[in-house]
Amino acid sequence: MVSEIQKKRSAYVSVTIPENQQKELENYIGVDVNTTGHIAVMSNPKTAKVLKFGKKAEHIHKKYKNIRRKLQVKGKYKKVKQIKNRENRIVNDLNHKISKKIMEVAAENNSGIKLENIKGIRKTAKQRKSFKYSLHSWSFYQLQYMLEYKARLLGVKIEYINPEYTSQNCSRCGYLGIRNGESFKCPHCGHVNHADVNAAFNIALRPGGQSGADKDVSGGSTGAPQVATV
Ligand SMILES: [Zn+2]
C-alpha cells in the first residue's frame, strides 16, 4: 500500500502567481538619501509623517576609519582589510533594513516614492558637505540599487526628480529659505524644520519624470528657486 508520504512525493502542485497588481497611487512619499546626518529621511506630505533612518551610519564610519588608521600605523594590513570588511557588512545590513522598511511603508500607504536623480546629487554634493560619506561611497549607490530592487518586488512606483534646490526651497511656500546645517528657516512664511525633513517634503512634492541614474539634469528647470518680492 502506498503511504501518504509517497503519495505526496509523486503529487505536483499547481501554483498561481498573481500578477503584480498596481493599485491607483494615493500619493508620493519623498525619500532624501543625501542628508546631513542620516542614511535616509522619508517625508509623507499626505500624513505629514516623517521617518529618519540610519543616524548612526556616520558614527560607524568614523569609528572604523579610526581603527584602520591606528592599525595602518602599526603595519597590520591584514587586520585593516578585516576591519574594512566588517564595516562593509554592517553598512550592507543597514542598507537592507532601511530600503526594506521604506518600501514597506510605501506599499502600506499605497504610495509611490520620489527620489533625487543620482547624477544631480553628485553635482550638488558641495551643498551638503557634512555627510560626504554617503555621497561618494559604494554604500550610497548600494542603497539606491536596493531601493529600486525592493520597489519592483513590492510593486512600488519610483519617480526621479530634479534635485536642484531641494535643500534650499521652503517645502511650505516654495520660496528660498535659509539653510544652516541641520536647520531650515523660511523668512517668507516662517516655516521652521529639520533641513533633511524639509528637503524630503520638497522631493515628495516636486513633479517626477527624470529617468534616473543616466539622465543629465543640467537642462532641468523644475527646481529653479522662486524669489520672493516681499
Ligand atoms: Zn516658506
Image (cartoon, grey):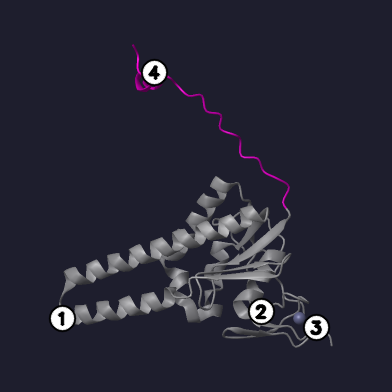
Residue under the image location 57 percent in, 47 percent down: 154
Residue type indicated by callout 4: Lys
Residue 221 percent coordinates (x, y): 71, 66
Tell me the distance, in whole angstroms, between the alpha carbons under discs 2 and 1.
Answer: 45 Å
The residue under label 3 is 228
Q: Of circles 2 and 1, which is in front?
A: 1
Residue type indicated by callout 2: Gln
Residue 25 at least partly seen: yes
Mark 1 in CB contact with mark 4 (< 8 angstroms): no
Tell me the distance, in whole angstroms, between the alpha carbons under discs 2 and 4.
Answer: 67 Å
Q: Earlier in the sequence, mark 3 or mark 1?
A: 1
Task: State whether label 4 is within 8 Å of ligand 1.
Answer: no
**Looking at the image, in which quadrant does ligand 1 appear?**
bottom right
- Residue 13 located within the stretch drawn in magenta: yes
The residue sitting at the left extreme is 75
Residue type indicated by callout 1: Lys
- Residue 30 located within the stretch drawn in magenta: no
Asked which secondary structure carries label 1, the reply is loop
The residue under label 4 is 7
The residue under label 1 is 74
Is 127 above or below relative to 214? below
**Can you tell which mark lies on residue 168?**
2
Magenta residues span 1-25
Q: Earlier in the sequence, mark 3 or mark 2?
A: 2
